[in-house]
Image (cartoon, rainbow, N blue to C red):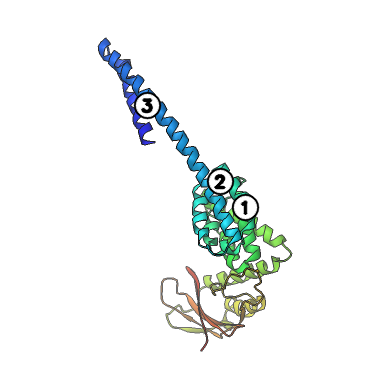
Amino acid sequence: MKFRQRKFEDIRNLDQVLRTSKVEEVKRIARTDRHKAKVWLNIDEEEHDRLKTARADYVKQSLDNFLCSLSYSDSYATDVLKFVATWLQHTHDIAANQAVERRISAVPTSKFAKLMNQLASRLQNSDERFQLILRSLVERICIQHPYHGMPNIFAGSKTAGGSDQIAISRNAAALKVVQKLQKNSIISKIWAAVHKSNELYIDFAAFKLDDMKQGSTWPLAKYGQSRRVARDIPRMHVPPITLSIDLRADCDYSAVPTITHFGSQMSIAGGLSAPKIVTVTTSAGQTCKQLVGRLLFQYECMLTT
């Protein structure tokens, strides 16, 4: 490409000489040099086209081979990183997307679930082939591995985007995934529980206490938002969001530890958002300290001794 650009510039400069010079000898030399430059430009363009075609073929073969490897073997699971990186670099390549579409459904979704954050961030409300393949993959991850996929989709569906057109499009794409989850008879109950519990946490994070002093302690039963969190979330049988849940090839998450009850008190941590600290106990006997604030929504899970 650099060679081509140099030749283009040479020809453009020589054309300028031919247009402006009034000396015939100068114009004769310019015509000769232009002819030579044109010959070399044609050679460079042919080589560029050859390399471009070869590169496209190699990209297609690489994607195809990565997916074959991921389909038939568990020995090279990290290849999913190389596959996704390559695919995302060629989202507008028709041949690349055709190769992906042909084989991606044969790859267990457990190998993609760990990359849900990267995949969900590339969702757009478009009917381009890449977006249709990506949306289908994200939907399959959410259905087969709900606790690894749904939090990202919930976040995307709640982020309207304001005036950012890319964010608006991502939000619309996430809402389309939500519609599929709601219509799925097997997974709709889990989605409803994840969605409602997250909304309760958001309401809990947003409301202000009478006294935001660091270290102060308050009963959860005193406020409507905290009372609803402590009362309703244990009924939904959801795990703490950042509890480390192993991916299962059989997609059976029936034994995942879920929140059984909250502690009776909440305290105020330091910081700009004055986050509230609560604790929950899971069905596996784990105690999770949760830090929930207006600018913060995170959890720290630790085993009970």
User: In the image, which is nearer the foreground, mark 3 or mark 2?
Assistant: 3
| Mark 3 and mark 1 residues within 8 Å of each other at the beta carbon | no
Q: Mark 2 points at which residue?
A: 96
Q: How far from the left and from the top, in percent, is residue 61?
A: 54, 47
Whole-number angstrom distance, CA of label 3 to CA of label 1:
42 Å
Residue count near mark 2 (Cα–Cα under 10 Å), binned few <14, some 14–19, many ≥20: many
Amino acid type at mark 3:
Trp
Comes first in the chain, label 2 or label 1: 2
Q: How far from the left and from the top, in percent, is residue 37?
A: 35, 24
Comes first in the chain, label 3 or label 1: 3
Q: Is residue 290 left or right of residue 43?
A: right
Q: Residue 256 carries which label?
A: none
Amino acid type at mark 2:
Ala
Identity of the residue furthest to the right in this view = 185
| Mark 3 and mark 2 residues within 8 Å of each other at the beta carbon | no
Whole-number angstrom distance, CA of label 3 to CA of label 2:
31 Å
| Mark 2 and mark 1 residues within 8 Å of each other at the beta carbon | no
Residue count near mark 3 (Cα–Cα under 10 Å), binned few <14, some 14–19, many ≥20: some
Q: Secondary structure under badge 1?
A: helix
Q: Which of 53 and 241 is in front in this view?
A: 53
Q: Secondary structure under badge 2?
A: helix
Q: How far from the left and from the top, in percent, is residue 291?
A: 49, 76
Q: Which mark is residue 40?
A: 3
Q: Name the residue under label 1.
A: 103
Total numbered badges shown on the rendered structure: 3
Residue count near mark 1 (Cα–Cα under 10 Å), binned few <14, some 14–19, many ≥20: some
Residue 19, quarter of picture = top left
Which quadrant is home to the N terminus? Answer: top left
